[in-house]
Amino acid sequence: MTDSLLGKIAYGASFCIGLPLLLWAWATRLDRLLPGLPSFEAGYSGVVMLCGGIALMATGMLSLWRRGGGLPMNAFPPPRLVRLGLYDWLAHPIYLGSALALAGGFLLGNLEAGIWIVLPCFVAGIFALLHGYEVPELKRRFRERYRSPCLCLPEDSRALPEPGHRLAALLLVLLPWAIGYEYLAVLLPETSPRQTFMPFELRWPVLEWTVVPYLFTYVLIVATPLLVTTRRDLRDFMVAGWIGTLLGLACFALFPLTAPPRPFVPQGALGDWLELQRMLDTPACAFPSFHVFWALLAAWVLRPRLSSFVAWSLAILLCASCVTTGMHSLLDVVSGFALFVLACRHHLIYRWTLSCCEGIANSWREWRVGRVRIINHGLYVGIASAVGLYLAGALLPHATPWQVFSIGLAGLAGACAWGQWLEASSKLMRPFGYYGGLFGGMAGLLLFGGAAFWPFFAAFACVAPVVQAIGRLRCLVQGCCHGRPCDVRHGIRYRREPSRVVRIAGWHDVPLYPTPLYSIAGNLVLAMVLYPLARYDAPASLIAGLYLFLSACLRFVEEQFRGEPQTPFVVGLSLYQLLALGCGFGGIALSMFPSPDFNGDPVWRPDMIKPALLLGVLSMLGMGADLPESSKPMSRLA
């Protein structure tokens, strides 16, 4: 038996047997550790999803075998691109089928943790694998022969949308929005001391007849992809819908505001409809109002079809019905309008953000104090370290300042040691590395956390995304963690000679992917996931494990866009992608440990100010001050 055949058998067994067993064990373990998760009634839906998912996977595999000449293995890919049959409509039917089958299995097994935690993580892992490796590799291998399937985001043109484009808007935009909304509607508490209604609004009457335009919003949302006249308009609808969904769901999780509908007494059939709508909905997911967002977005893209007057008049009526039915407050409506503005102006916001990043990337400044050089980018990491250490202390009211400081210092030392071991050279004498900081911080947790190991880990996991998001501004100035060349519309240019982009990579004035910006955005999303878990007293091990897993997914995708010449590659993946894979599986294992619940409500800690400032100064000196004329180890930053 050849080594290639053995490799294929081992690879296939790991994905077809090992991974499902791991996910099932993960869900079973979390189900025991989290007995309070919402339950569900599977009925026939579990059987349908399981059988449908297996059928979809089998059809996709058979199609690759017959038409592609191989099996669905990234390490041993089929030699021919398949875009016929099922693959003419779906780009990745095997992954979709696996997610459906997994959901069906969890439903039939009554594994609540499988549905609420493992399945979303599995989907995140699929997304990372696709966009961090598989899709770019397909485009590289097949180049001009590669084309998108029918169900995809349409190109920016005035042509009439194809049926697949319209169906894609329903399945790839509206369906994820509905799933995400219902997901949070079940998990978030329906009562809260903080409501969005102001006292004077509670005295307003409820107009039963306005339930008609209120319910018509659902019809308009579904009809919009079918009515748009150009691919550009449909593309704008889909992209704005994704952005609005992400930001809106984040607001639901971060701001526990509720809007209990204003009371009324039904007077007829319309009143009964309104009462039924209230029974089916939740007061927890109201700020911002998705009714307002979708009504305005539909009017925006349907202006060429309906005329601006008709489209905006209809939108105003639908938005007003949110108030007149008593379903939403004025604050909900205003926030829904703000969400619409942010989403539909994403082009302008994106270009402005790129311009700001390019300005920061070319803002290198340095000052001399004798032989010592102080570089301005050290200020960013100093602020990141100080803010992060203080926030960690604020989340740990019973921890002593020296404990928190020691763990933070261990992370800084680990980052330095990692950079020296992996990347140090004559041109790069004092590099720092994220994974070194991660491993150093974990060593500090073991050494100084003591009996409070798990709360410490959870607290640092919650603040780590904030620290990294701020610290990435240093990466922009220094030129580390930079991207590879790209289209000018999506890139930023480096022009300062001391930058690592110019000095080491030699890409002066070349558009590069703004990978530090991608990291900032991804870490902010990660913070939006972890902090609500801490606020609702999730187990500390779950918070720590999810940080490792989700940050690994983000890093795996980010690495696909990075272009540092000193980064080694192994079996087609960068070293950091392999490390991300290890951290992802490590996060799964970590989340299965029993641990106390972690309360993420921060407290004011004046005693943490001095340790936070001290770590900030040490970080700033370590990453922003050097001896440029020296040739000794660790003497120079650039």
Image (cartoon, rainbow, N blue to C red):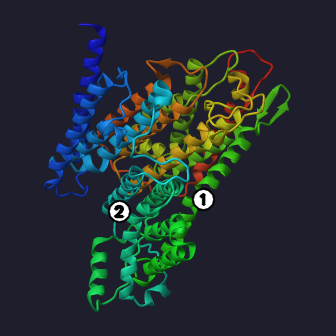
Element on which disc 2 rests: loop
Count every numbered label the image shows and give the total.
2
Which part of the image, by quadrant, shows the N terminus? top left
Q: Residues within 10 Å of mark 1 (few under 14, many from 20)?
A: few
Residue 242 in the image: state x and y as whole percent: 47, 54
Residue 205 in the image: state x and y as whole percent: 41, 91
Residue 201 in the image: state x and y as whole percent: 47, 85
Q: What amino acid does circle 1 point to?
A: Arg
Most extreme residue toward the front, as rendered? 159
Query: In the rendered image, which quarter is residue 277 located in?
Result: bottom left
Which part of the image, by quadrant, shows the C terminus? top right
Most extreme residue toward the top, as rendered? 1
- Foreground residue among 162 and 475: 162
- Foreground residue among 534 and 268: 268
In the rendering, which numbered label is found on residue 345? 1
In the rendering, which numbered label is found on residue 188? 2
Find the distance from the CA under tag 2 to the CA under tag 1: 29 Å
In this orientation, does residue 449 appear?
no
Which residue lies at the image location 55% right of the left edge and 40% below the top edge?
Answer: 519
Q: Nearer the viewer, mark 2 or mark 1?
A: 1
Which residue lies at the image location 37% right of the left edge and 61% below the top edge?
Answer: 181
Is residue 512 left or right of 29 when viewed as pictured?
Answer: right
- Foreground residue among 97 and 193: 97
Q: What amino acid does circle 2 point to?
A: Leu
